[in-house]
Image: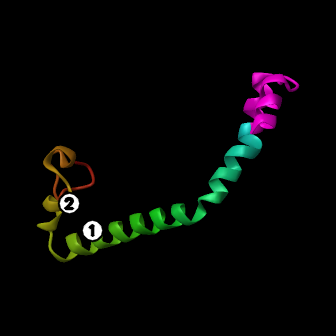
Amino acid sequence: LCTRAYFQLYGVPSSALSQLGRFFRAAWPTAVRSIWRETLVAFLLTVAAAVVGYVLVRGDPSWFFGIVGDGMAQGRDPSASAES
């Protein structure tokens, strides 16, 4: 830990632009690749919720008001036209 701190403080300084470039070129992609399982689970849960919502509203339109709030619907309902 002391060695890392030494090099952090007294190492060869690099510009902020090169550090930013290194972050977007290497650090961020590595971090994203390391959480691919969590990302996949979140994606699958989102797709499953959308499918369940579609099936519920398709089978019984009254479910629409249980899923979509009045403020979000802005007066529309499942029978609304594309123009509205």
Residue type, numbered disc 2: Ile
- Taking the image as shown, residue 10 lies to the left or right of residue 50, namely right
Q: Position of residue 72 (x, y in %)?
A: 21, 46
Q: Position of residue 23 (x, y in %)?
A: 72, 38
Q: On the image, numbered disc 1 is attached to which residue? A: 53
Residue type, numbered disc 1: Gly
Span shown in magenta? 1-22
- Taking the image as shown, residue 40 lies to the left or right of residue 47, namely right
Q: CA distance from mark 2 to mark 1?
A: 7 Å
- Residue at 52 percent of width and 62 percent of height: 38
Whether 1 is drawn above or below 41: the answer is above
The residue at the far right in this view is 12
Q: Position of residue 41 (x, y in %)?
A: 48, 67
Are the residues tagged 2 and 1 within 8 Å (C-beta)? yes
Q: On the image, numbered disc 2 is attached to which residue? A: 67
Picture quadrant where residue 6 is located: top right
Picture quadrant where residue 78 is located: bottom left
Q: Secondary structure at mark 2?
A: helix
Q: Which of 4/29 is in front?
A: 4
- Residue at 40 percent of width and 67 percent of height: 45
